Structures are given as structure tokens and as C-alpha cells.
Amino acid sequence: MARLAVRLPPGVREIGPKLLQPVLPRSAVEPRPPGDGVFVPKGTRLADAEWLLIEAALVDTGHDRARAAKALGIGVRTLRRKLNGG
């Protein structure tokens, strides 16, 4: 951010998506949809998208693995295996 602030054109006081696009990956500056869903940027690997869903389910359930597994439609053992990298 410090490098970006130094490179700001004269008179620019706000750092927005147009200024960030050359510096950050495209997915980091794309607008996110409203609501409580999980945002998965284009080009995200399936394994990474799955992790985003698992992480959201755990947060939503207060890290209750049984409830998170049920919300994801998988068994607790499957969730445990995925969390352990398997």
C-alpha cells in the first residue's frame, strides 16, 4: 500500500479498483455479490473453492463439525478427512 500511495497521480485521494488492478490479482478487486454466500473468483482451483465452502460452513456453525458437515451435505468423517488434507 505504501508503494501504491507514493505512485498515486496528483490530486487522487482515494485508492479504488482502477488503481489496484495493476498491483493486485484480478480476483482481489472484482466486485463481490451481495448476500451471505461464498465468493469464489473465476479461475479458483476446485480444491480451493471447496476449502472456502468448508471454512464458511465452520464459521456459520461456530466450528461445530457435525453441523458444518450436515450443512455441506457430507459426513463428519469426510469433513475431518478434508480438514486433515486428505
Image (tube, helix red, strand yellow):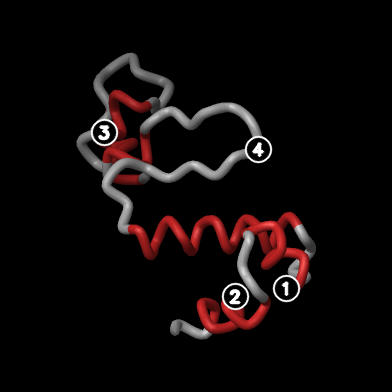
Spatial distance from mark 4 to mark 1, Cα to Cα? 20 Å
User: Are dots 4 and 2 in contact, CB under 8 Å?
Assistant: no
The circle on residue 36 is 4
Secondary structure under badge 2? helix
Where residue 47 appears, as percent x and y from the top left, is 38, 65
Q: Earlier in the sequence, mark 4 or mark 3?
A: 3
Residue beneath label 1, please? 65
User: Are dots 1 and 3 in contact, CB under 8 Å?
Assistant: no
Q: How many marks?
A: 4
Spatial distance from mark 2 to mark 1, Cα to Cα? 7 Å
| Amino acid beneath label 1 | Arg
Question: Mark 4, mark 1: which one is toward the viewer?
Answer: 1
In the depicted structure, whether residue 57 falls above or below residue 1: below
Residue at the spot x=35%, y=59% of the render? 46
Spatial distance from mark 4 to mark 3, Cα to Cα? 25 Å
Spatial distance from mark 2 to mark 3, Cα to Cα? 36 Å
User: Are dots 2 and 1 in contact, CB under 8 Å?
Assistant: yes
Residue at the spot x=79%, y=63% of the render? 62
Residue beneath label 2, please? 79
Q: Residues within 10 Å of mark 3 (few under 14, many from 20)?
A: some
Decide which of 3, 67 is in the foreground and name it.
Answer: 67
